[in-house]
Amino acid sequence: MQIHISTHDGVPVYLQIVNQVKYLAAAGRLAAGEELPSVRTLAEQLVINPNTVARAYLELERAGVVVKRHGSGTYVSEEGSPLARKERMKLLTQRADSLLAEARHMDVALDEILALVKDRHKNLNSNQK
């Protein structure tokens, strides 16, 4: 699990961890049932206070993204993140907004964008077979 912390963006470190774990779970990079690093291990990797990691894990547990098994560790919820679909749609919405804004600046019509997306979808599907 790769977590990157920035001390310059104004977002509390524990929230950066929460947001990144939610993203990783929503994107399928963390599978249901997968064990997260221990509080101490992640704190050492990120060079932060273990209490910060513990707070992030508590927030993730409250959100239903992870479950704690006493004496065993912290795991991605077997049900997967209840926010998974919502998070995926949020990410895709941001990317769609960026695409549409860029298309507007380039004077590309919506019907051309839709045709392009359909073509790329078809191409990707044919490459997977």
Image (cartoon, rainbow, N blue to C red):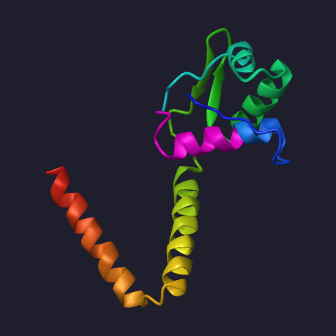
Secondary structure mostly seen in the magenta stretch: helix
Determine which quarter of the picture holds residue 19.
top right
The residue lying toward the viewer, choosing from 122 and 77, is 122
Query: In this orientation, does residue 81 appear?
Result: no
Evaluate whether residue 90 shows in this view: yes
Whether residue 72 sits left or right of residue 124 in the image: it is right
Is-magenta flag for residue 43?
Answer: no
* Residue range of the region highlighted in magenta in the rendering: 18-31
Expressed as whole percent of the image width and height from the top left, the position of residue 56 reads 76, 33
Q: Residue furthest top?
A: 71
Residue name at image x 13 percent, y 51 percent? 129
Residue ID at (49%, 46%)? 27
At which x and y percent is residue 61? 70, 34
22 magenta-colored: yes
Q: Is residue 98 above or below residue 115?
A: above
Which quadrant of the rendered structure holds the N terminus? top right
Find residue 5 and report its image quarter: top right
